[in-house]
Image (cartoon, coloured by chain):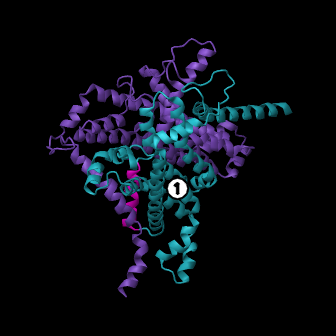
Amino acid sequence: MNWIRIIQKTGKYITLVVISFLSLIPFYILITIGLSKNVGKLKIDFSFLPDFHFVNFILAWTKSGLGISLVNSFVITSGALVILVIFSSSAGYSIARFASPFNRTILNIFLLCMMIPGIINTVALYTLMIKIGGINTRWAMILVLSANSLPFSVFLYTNFIRSIPRDVEESAIIDGCTWFSAFWRVTFHFLKPVTAAVAILQGLGIWNNYAQAVFFLQRKDVRTIPLAISMFFQQYGANWSLMAGAAIIGLAPAVLIFLFFQKFFIKGIISGAVKG
Amino acid sequence: MKQKKLRNNLHKVMAVPAFILFFIFFIYPLFQSIGLSLTNWNGFSKATFIGIRNFITFFSDSRALNDIKVTVLFALGSAPLLNIFGLVYALLLDKEFKGKSLVRVIVYLPAVISPLIMGYLWYFILQPQRGVLFTVLSHAGWVISGNWLGKSGPALVVLILVNVWQFVGMTMIIYLAGLQTISPEMYEASDMEGAGYWTTLRYVTLPLLLPSIKINVITNIIGSLSVFEIIIALTDGGPGYATESLSIYILRMVHGSFTGYSTAVALILFFIILIPVFISLKVMKRMEYEA
């Protein structure tokens, strides 16, 4: 019967709407609180329309000092990603193409360390950071966070490079390249999908990092977004509209960047993550 | 001549820079942690070697034992739910239909936000007497205490559900990626044999999804057992220490200058993570042979 299909189809679409609704409703509540006129109260008349009281955002912005934290988060995330992409792509190339006991050992160490959460190192890392003068500096945070993200990135690059044919480099070798320069001139350009996946997946992890930042970035002028938000919340815990305004400012960059790059991201994950 | 030889061999050592960086900021501190865990160091004065006394202290501290319980219960709830919902979502969103990529993006969206901020967001909704959920329910005429976060049992359930809500998209994406690698001929062949939906799922889809299942099971075990941001934002480990996870305990011990002790706890957490990871890797390896 035809209408069985129709029922199936509507059922499916209802499920999808419910799923989307479930994921979106907390954001809607956050925005409504952020735009609310009366501090800390959601207007309950079941119309659930926001007040569009944008002053909250301006207040939250000026009171929280989120501006400098945005800059810090941006500098740390982009710095760490540049190091991460260069180091892990070249490591992935060497491991995927030139099998040797040396390269195999390095890959195994990375795979093993993927299972170790970064929090375990906190204290020892702290003493190291004091020794190298890295506390409250952005450069040391860049090194720590890129190092922490290396295992998974190397894993993704190695898998991906194994799946592209060797001829890519071989033709460059004939033209007089060394294997080393062939990678940067040729192979690297084929890695865009997996680079997108690494940049978004690890970039978000670095952007959102709290476990390390809370120890190594204590001064106000080096604080990142998550730190600034949690400080702000401890200070203005009662003023919901202000808190919601700050939270929206804090999460907007990640959301926007994700929405902008989501196409590459999903493609990249598909091509990099689940092979072999 | 020598320089040329170097240039021609450079490709063999291209993993070295990554490894050096990783060694300095991960492996070296890791080994140092093992040493520190055997001392009574407080972060300032000289450390004295005290053998395994930190470990003995840990296992005779009722708060620490409770934290193990909380951490394990959280993972037992969170990791399976993430995998089940992630898989169901992926199966739903794998088929071709209008708006498919939109729904995928929406489901993934919560996962891009810091768990800390996400925790605060849920606090608006769940706070007793004042939260959005309480207000809505009481307006609808439901008389409830609304004290979801004030009792250990319900608070833990709420934490698990919020965590699943936030990261289901992450698990889903990996399953979607796995589903893409299954060629349509496999389904056609199964269809020709007259297999129904469930039989196909059990004997075709799931075995071929094993690489994705592996990644998801492992990352969810690690993630759930080292949870802390969402708890800090929602209950701060409370009431009392009822929802304190081991990671939070470690952070608090570091702040309380129990530095040597905190590294000992970190190593214990490492083993708590390692055991289920190795067991599930073994189990999945066996499944691979059988498939």
Query: In the picture, residue B257 is in which quadrant?
Result: top left
- In the figure, is residue B69 to the left or right of A123? right
Q: Residue at x 62, y 52 (%)?
A: A260
Furthest-right residue in this view: A2
Q: Residue at x 31, y 35 (%)?
A: B252
User: Compared with residue B206, is residue A186 higher up or lower down, i.e. above or below?
Assistant: below
Locate residue B103, reporting x and y percent. 67, 41
**Mark 1 sits on what residue?**
A199
Furthest-bottom residue in this view: B1
| Range shown magenta | A100-117
Chain colored cyan:
A
The overriding secondary structure of the stretch rendered in magenta is helix
Check if residue A106 falls in the magenta segment.
Answer: yes
Comparing B149 with A64, the one in front is A64
Locate residue A111, reporting x and y percent. 41, 54
Comparing A56 with A134, the one in front is A56
- In the figure, is residue A158 to the left or right of A21? left
Locate residue B175, reporting x and y percent. 58, 45
